[in-house]
Amino acid sequence: MPATQSQIALLRWYVEMGADESIGWEAQDRLAPKRPPAAPIVRPAAPVAAEREPDFAPAITSLAGHPAEAATTLAELEEAVRAFEGCALKRTATNTVFADGIRGAPLMIIGEAPGADEDRLGKPFVGRSGQLLDRMLAAIGFSRQSNAYITNILFWRPPGNRKPTGDEIAACLPFVWRHIALGRPRLVLLSGGTATAAMLDRSEGITRLRGRWFELQVPGLDRPVPAMASYHPSFLLRTPARKSEVWRDLLAIQAKFDESG
């Protein structure tokens, strides 16, 4: 739209007053009250991984009165688990899923619960997520046939693969602590949010806890066991973009073994 005579006159007046440059398309009200400047956002510096001390996880201080207490070997513990009637999941499951791999192996993996394939075959991590776990372990030189031991925090499948309840976890957890004490692994991999929250007694989600080292204070052991939290393979099957994060976790586990000889 062409300029009006009044606009042209105003422009000439600006030029006569010394204005020789346009600095914006919209007029600004110089008399309007000025807003105070926004406070600068100060972000805390990210912690340096090499300097971060391990977190200490709470332990069950006593297994007194629980059937897990009497077990002195992994074979006895398995018998105690199979005879246990204190978890309602046992009544709906096909099999008790105790463990797989090499007993006494330096690396122990603790997952959530058996799925349909695990319940049918009686072994942990044998479905698609188990196949992915095997490939993950092989990438850093581990396997259930030579130097890895695999179990879950629950020994029976929740119907429909639903998330375990707090009561179901509480009934099985003393067995898990005794499992670690009798297996004496050098490192533990906590696989998935449910296993991590149960073993560490933490409310944060797995996205906040993964990639961090924790020290498990295990009843019956005279020193804590280092544990790494990471994503469950079933989560990676649904969200493959997160595989790079788990790869970093696996490299950290490999480096930890290399450091300890």
Image (tube, rainbow, N blue to C red):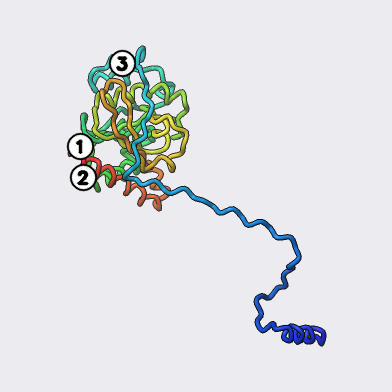
Query: Looking at the picture, which amino acid does disc 1 mark?
Result: Asn
The crowd level at tag 1 (other Cα within 10 Å; few <14, some 14-19, many 20+) is: some
Query: Looking at the picture, which amino acid does disc 3 mark?
Result: Glu
x and y percentages locating residue 63 in the rendered image:
35, 16
The answer to whether 171 is drawn above or below residue 241 in the figure is above
**Image point 34% across, 35% down: which residue?**
214
x and y percentages locating residue 217 in the rendered image:
32, 26
Distance (Cα) linking label 2 and label 3: 34 Å
Distance (Cα) linking label 1 and label 2: 9 Å
Chain-order first, disc 2 or disc 3? 3
Residue 96 sits in quarter: top left
Nearest the viewer among 229 and 22 is 22
Nearest the viewer among 12 and 4 is 12
Nearest the viewer among 95 and 141 is 141
x and y percentages locating residue 119 in the rendered image:
35, 32
Distance (Cα) linking label 3 and label 1: 26 Å
Instruction: Report the quarter where the C terminus lies.
Output: top left
Mark 1 — residue? 147
Extreme residue toward the top, this view:
65
The crowd level at tag 2 (other Cα within 10 Å; few <14, some 14-19, many 20+) is: few
Provide the secondary structure element on which disc 3 rests: helix
Q: Which of the labelled discs sits on residue 141, or is there none?
A: 2
Labelled pair 3, 1 in contact (Cβ < 8 Å): no
**Image point 70% across, 60% down: which residue?**
34
Residue 77 sits in quarter: top left
Mark 3 — residue? 69
Query: Looking at the picture, which amino acid does disc 2 mark?
Result: Gly
Residue 221 sits in quarter: top left
In the displayed structure, does residue 15 sit left or right of residue 140?
A: right
